[in-house]
Structure formats: structure tokens, C-alpha cells
Image (cartoon, rainbow, N blue to C red):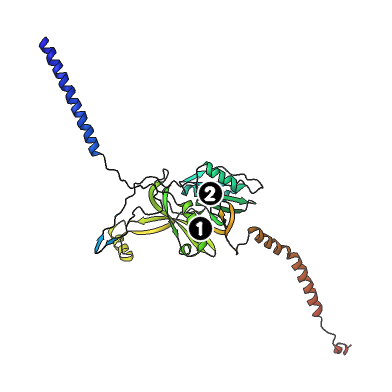
Amino acid sequence: RQFKEQHKDIRQLTMGKENKRRKRESNEGTIESEPVRDTHDDSDASDGEDETEGMAMIQDGDEVMAPTATVSDGKYHNKQRCLVVCSRGVTARYRHLLEDLRTLMPHHKKESKLDAGRNDSGGRMVNDIALLRSCNSVLFLECRKHMDCYMWLSRLNGDSPGPSVRFLVSNVHTMDELRLTGNCLKGSRPVLSFDESFDRVDHLRLLKGLFIDTFGTPRGHPKAKPFVDRVMCFYHADNRIWVRNYQILEQQPSNAKEAKEAKKLEGQASTTNLVEIGPRFVLNPIRIFKGSFGGPTLYQNAEFVSPNAMRAMEKRKKGTAYMDRKRSRDNRKERREQLVLPVDPLDTVFD
């Protein structure tokens, strides 16, 4: 019995030492297998830029060093949030347009309808709501007289918010109204396409930055999908901005014959097409302000005619219809009096 108790104590002591040794070795293995952290700070990386940087060539005498590429860590650095709100009294068409825009913008912040009243404090209210919701850009639809829709785009960054721009929205067609065949993944990131005018004209360059901040989905957003399957196009024509949304569709041939014909026509087996999704609308820029919803004017469209002035001109034309009818009746009476034949003296010869 004494021998068994001594043997048991020796075995427990040996097992305790063995467990400590294994634990120490596992800790050392964990430390050795830990990946080396990169000392490069990537916190200021922006979303719109490409992930590869540092492609500049460094020349030292005759030696040329190879370019170094920095791979992005894929984290959510550009915390872009856009407040999407409309005013009270908006019509059904513009309310559906707002819902379509919210569907296309996974980084939006939703807010109930804004009732600014008859005063001009709507801009200050929108700015306060944006600050409370931690948003750095605003898309505000303002409806007047249940007929005219104005779109505000504003930037709220730092202590000096701005700039902001006001558009007149026209030719609105929503997704449900168009019933187009295009379809994309909800929450996918778009490719923003601009024509060459946005790089040539001064005020269009400013509008391009506002469009990128508003409609560009940040990389790594929690509600965004890591796919790019649509393109949002902005075209400048007739002093207006035409907005279209397309799906990037790649068609694969179903058999070898179609692949051969496609390769003969296009030069490759698969073809890439654009199919419109919607919505579509036209923006007529009115004025660009330095601040958010106000401030000094940076640009004003001299060719813009307000919808109220256009309706007044049409009513003025319709108001002159009665006077035109009276004038034509008097003219017709005068012509009939002038068309009377003179008296012929030979008419009484045979009487």
C-alpha cells in the first residue's frame, strides 16, 4: 500500500510537469505564429481612390527601383453617411423617386417628412438633423405647390459646411413606372460615370464632387455588397444634367456556335451590355451656394426660368384668346363691307 501511494504521487508530479511544459510550448507557438503587423497607417485612405498606391518610379543614378504597391486592408474607413429627406406635401411621383434613391444608396439615413412651414428655416432644420444623425452629406427634396420639385445637395464637413446646390427636377420616371428589364443586386456599389463636360466646366467640376459624395457608396459599408454590377451616368446637355442608371450585364454564349459568332463580331466570346434599371430624371441647376443651404452665391444659371413664370406666360396667352376672337370678328366685318360690288349703270337699260 505504501509503495502504491508513493507511485501515485510520483505520477501526479510527472503529469503536472508535462502539462506545464505543453502549455509553455503552445504559448510560444502562438506568439511565433502571430502575423507581423504593418506599421503603415491606412486610416486616411479614401474610398474613391484605388487601393494600389506608391506606383512612382525612384531613380538613383542608373538604378531604377521597382514600384511598391500597398494593398488595402478592406476596412471601413470612409464613413460616408447621407441624409435623405423630403418636405411635407410632396406628391406620389416624387415620393416614389425618393424611395428609389434610398434603394440605390445603402449609406443613406432615413428621416420623416420635414414640415418647415412658411418660413425659410428649412435649411437650418435639415442641417441640425444631419448633425444629430452624424451625416456629412444631405439630399433634400423640396416640393412647392404640389407641382414643382427642387433637389438640394449639400456637404457638411467640419466647421465650415458647404457647398450646396439647388436643382429643379423634371422628367421624372420611377422604377415601377418604367418597368425596365434591368436588375441589380440591392446594396451593390455603383460605377459613377461622367461625361467630359464635368472635367472642363468649372461649376460642373464642383457638382461632380457633390454627386460622388452623395451617390457614391463607400467601400466596406456594413449595408453595402462587395459587388459592382451597375453604373450611374451623368450627362450634361442643353444646360441640364441627365441622370440614368444601368445594369452591367455580361452575356455568356449557350453553345459553341454562339460563342464563335460572338467572337467573330465582338472579338471575344462574352459580351458586356448595359440595361437600364431606373429611375431617370433631369436636373436643371439653379444656383450654387458657398454654405449649406445658403451663403454667398458661387454660380447662378442665367438661362433658368422658374416654373411660376412659365405658367404665368401660358395663362397670359390663354387670357388673350377672347380678345383675339373679338379682333378677328371685327376684321371679318370690315372685309365684308369692303367686298360690296359697285352699282352698274347698264342694269336699268332693259327695264
Q: Is residue 291 visible?
A: yes
Crowding near pointer 1: few (<14 within 10 Å), some, many (20+)? some
Task: State the residue in front, 157 or 324.
Answer: 157
Q: Residue furthest front?
A: 61
In the picture of the structure, the residue carrying the numbered disc 1 is 207
Q: Residue at x 51, y 60 (%)?
A: 242
Q: Residue furthest top?
A: 1
Q: Could you tell me residue 196's position as x and y percent?
A: 45, 64
Asked if labels 1 and 2 touch by Cβ distance under 8 angstroms, the answer is no
238 left or right, relative to 272:
right
Give the quadrant of the C terminus: bottom right
The secondary element bearing badge 1 is classed as helix
Q: Residue at x 30, y 65 (%)?
A: 264
Crowding near pointer 2: few (<14 within 10 Å), some, many (20+)? many
Q: Amino acid at mark 1?
A: Leu
Image height of 18 relative to 311, above or below: above
Q: Amino acid at mark 2?
A: Leu
Spatial separation of the CA atoms under disc 2 and disc 1: 20 Å
Q: Could you tell me residue 274's position as x and y percent?
A: 41, 58
Image height of 345 relative to 105, above or below: below
Task: State the residue in front, 213 or 241.
Answer: 213
Task: State the residue in front, 191 or 291.
Answer: 291
Q: Could you tell me residue 33's position as x and y percent?
A: 23, 39
The secondary element bearing badge 2 is classed as helix
Give the quadrant of the N terminus: top left
Q: Nearer the viewer, mark 2 or mark 1?
A: 1
> For residue 147, which numbered disc appears in the image?
none
Q: Is residue 286 visible?
A: no
Q: Residue at x 50, y 64 (%)?
A: 201
Count of residue discs: 2
In the picture of the structure, the residue carrying the numbered disc 2 is 98
Mark toward the start of the polypeptide (2 vs 1): 2
